[in-house]
Image (spheres, rainbow, N blue to C red):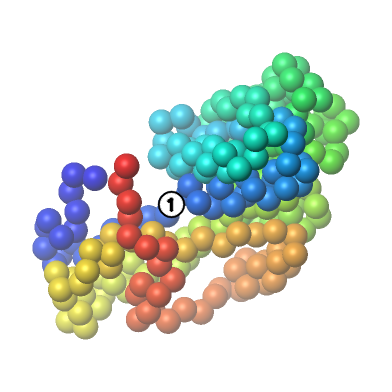
Amino acid sequence: DDLHPWDIGDNYVSHMTWSDEKPAEQTARILFDAMGGKGGVVHLGGIAANNPAIERLNGLKNALKDFPDIELLDAQPADWDTTKGTELMASFLTRFGDKITGVHCANDNIAYGVIEALRAEGIENMPIVAYDGNPEAVKLVMDGKLLATVFTNPHWGGGITAALAYYAATGAFKPSEEPKEHREFYGPTVLVTKKDAADFKAKYLDAVPSYNWKDFWGPSNGQIKYK
């Protein structure tokens, strides 16, 4: 947070990233509702020092404030990895047993491992949420094995940053004359649940969505906030 595009000039057109905290809070609320607003949840995170891992855990904790009857039993890193997700979930099951009534995963890969660990114990109906919107995870949402995942739309992210650079270079706009929320901004996310998973798959996975590449900031989720 020490260096910004407006500190550099017009050649540093913009910086775009995603904020994972709010979407992770959304998935947590879906999870807690499925748990009936009570019980015990475990969180399997990414690499502990990674900003996305921190934001996704913070999203869970934000949602917990509105669910006093849900206990966070533990939150441990699974390093974004399926095998580690399996091992960590097996450890949680040994420690907490049937106190676990919901699982919050920092990404889809971890969720795949969680499902394997649960299956090994004969547990088929545990509420689970994940993050990333990978094709396998979307299929699991459609099949009812996951409650939700979150898609960050890298196609739009890559395209819009290229478009910004192109149109700035060709003089369509002058970066230094734009407000700060146009120089540093969050990209959009898509929450995928069972009711919309088939439509999501058709639009984003089975086809290439079309975008207006001159609508630079319309889908933006606002200016980046540093804490």
Task: Please give the name of the residue rendered at 79% of the width and 21% of the height, measured from the top-left corner.
Answer: 97
Q: Residue at x 51, y 60 (%)?
A: 189
Q: Residue at x 74, y 20 (%)?
A: 96
- The quarter of the displayed image where residue 190 is located: bottom right
Q: Which residue is mark 1?
A: 19
Please determine whether, in this image, residue 104 is positioned above or below residue 74.
below
Let me know if residue 84 appears in the view: no
Q: Position of residue 214 (x, y in %)?
A: 35, 81
Q: Position of residue 131 (x, y in %)?
A: 59, 48
Answer with left or right where residue 146 lies relative to residue 18.
right
Could you tell whether 93 is left or right of 219 in the image?
Answer: right
- Image quarter of residue 172: bottom left
Side (left or right) of 167 relative to 187: left
Residues packed near mark 1 inside 10 Å, few (<14), some (14 to 19) or many (20 plus) = many
Horizontal side of 68 relative to 52 (left or right) equals right
Q: Secondary structure at mark 1?
A: loop
Residue 164 visible in the shown view: yes
Residue 67 x %, y %? 65, 40
